[in-house]
């Protein structure tokens, strides 16, 4: 049991390390167009001619010639607003974002703070822009909108919850998975995984080589890419082996698995996936069930 606790700490440190990498790799910025439209979005790439951003869970490619400014110092959730340039009767100009207005006054949020201006002093009150613009669908990155093939690697750390839990308390290992784009439909994805798990004990060692087909349902909540959750159900077969110093027994048995997880950390073509997983192998006279954490990294091709 002590070994299981130590492995749990190592896996949690691994997840925390991957989380730091993912969060530090995102670059929020304010993108301002020539017409005054402004967006707070995550930048995925920034080249000499183009910038690729992720806004409200969609990916857009924007030519820099259409932009007035990119400000990496401004951060926040995905949002949008207008910059207005108002000319006063004395010829001076004030640039800011609409905040509020009354019958006689209008308030702008400027670089120096909030500024209230009498409407009688405005030479061009029609230049005031209000509301929240949306990025045009014409800017959508066509490659990013199609289903993507995914391959990944993961590690497992389980607690044995079957009859043999006292003899074999901890089960750990890892595997590979493959999710082809042509098996993606709406929020559903069919995938394949292959994994090896080991359960050492005082009198011997259990090992499981498992191959499964699974169906995964994913959904992003509240238009927030960080709230990307999924449910995964899989079935397949396991090559189960029990070895002691003197004997070895083996058999092929059916297995099932259920996962509930989160995959909100994304950067470029990589993604972190963490879940709580329950898996059972059904032998002829009994079953071996396990439960615990699975953490991995995938690449979107």
Image (spheres, rainbow, N blue to C red):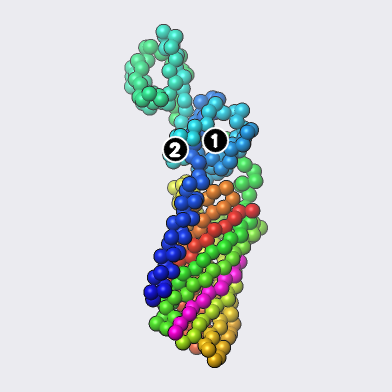
Compare marks 2 and 1 and give the one earlier in the sequence. Answer: 2
Q: Work out whether residue 177 or residue 256 is closer to the camera in this orientation and state it.
A: 177
- Residue 99 numbered tag: none
Residue 219 lies, in percent from the top left, at 50, 54
Image side of residue 152 versus residue 14, left or right: right
Chain part drawn in magenta? 192-202
Crowdedness of circle 1 by 10 Å Cα count: few (<14), some, many (20+)?
some
Whether label 2 touches label 1, CB < 8 Å: no
Q: Position of residue 129 (x, y in %)?
A: 46, 24
Secondary structure beneath dot 1 equals loop
Where disc 2 sits, the SS reads loop
Q: Which residue is mark 2?
A: 75
Which of the two discs, 2 and 1, sits closer to the camera? 2
Where is residue 91 shown, x and y percent of the image?
44, 9
- Looking at the image, residue 257 sits to the left or right of residue 299; the answer is left
Q: Main secondary structure of the magenta part?
A: strand
| Residue drawn at (64%, 59%) of the image | 180
Q: Residue furthest top?
A: 90
Please tell me in which quadrant of the rendered image residue 119 appears: top left
Residue with the mark numbered 1: 135
Of 127 and 195, the residue lying toward us:
195
Q: Which part of the image, by quadrant, shows the N terminus? A: bottom left
Seen at 61% across and 47% down, the residue is 145
Q: Is residue 106 visible?
A: yes
């Amino acid at each position: 049991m002590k070994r299981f606790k130590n492995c749990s700490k190592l896996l949690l440190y691994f997840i925390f390390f991957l989380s730091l990498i993912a969060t530090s790799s995102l670059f929020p910025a304010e993108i301002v167009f020539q017409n005054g439209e402004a967006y707070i979005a995550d930048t995925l790439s920034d080249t000499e001619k183009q910038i690729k951003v992720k806004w409200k869970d969609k990916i857009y490619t924007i030519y820099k010639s259409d932009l007035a400014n990119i400000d990496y110092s401004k951060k926040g959730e995905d949002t949008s607003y207008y910059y207005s340039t108002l000319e006063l009767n004395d010829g001076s100009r004030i640039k800011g974002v609409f905040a509020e207005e009354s019958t006689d006054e209008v308030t702008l949020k400027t670089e120096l703070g909030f500024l209230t201006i009498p409407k009688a002093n405005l030479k061009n009150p029609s230049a005031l822009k209000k509301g929240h613009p949306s990025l045009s669908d014409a800017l959508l990155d066509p490659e990013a909108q199609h289903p993507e093939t995914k391959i990944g690697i993961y590690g497992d750390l389980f607690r044995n919850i079957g009859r043999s839990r006292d003899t074999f308390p901890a089960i750990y290992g890892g595997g590979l998975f493959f999710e082809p784009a042509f098996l993606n439909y709406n929020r559903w994805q069919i995938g394949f995984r292959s994994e090896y798990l080991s359960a050492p004990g005082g009198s011997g060692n259990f090992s499981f080589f498992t191959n499964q087909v699974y169906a995964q349902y994913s959904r992003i909540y509240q238009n927030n890419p960080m709230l990307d959750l999924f449910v995964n159900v899989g079935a397949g077969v396991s090559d189960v082996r029990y070895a002691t110093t003197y004997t070895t027994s083996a058999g092929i048995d059916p297995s099932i698995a259920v996962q509930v997880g989160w995959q909100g950390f994304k950067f470029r073509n990589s993604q972190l996936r963490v879940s709580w997983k329950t898996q059972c192998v059904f032998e002829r006279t009994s079953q071996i069930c396990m439960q615990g954490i699975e953490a991995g990294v995938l690449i979107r091709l």
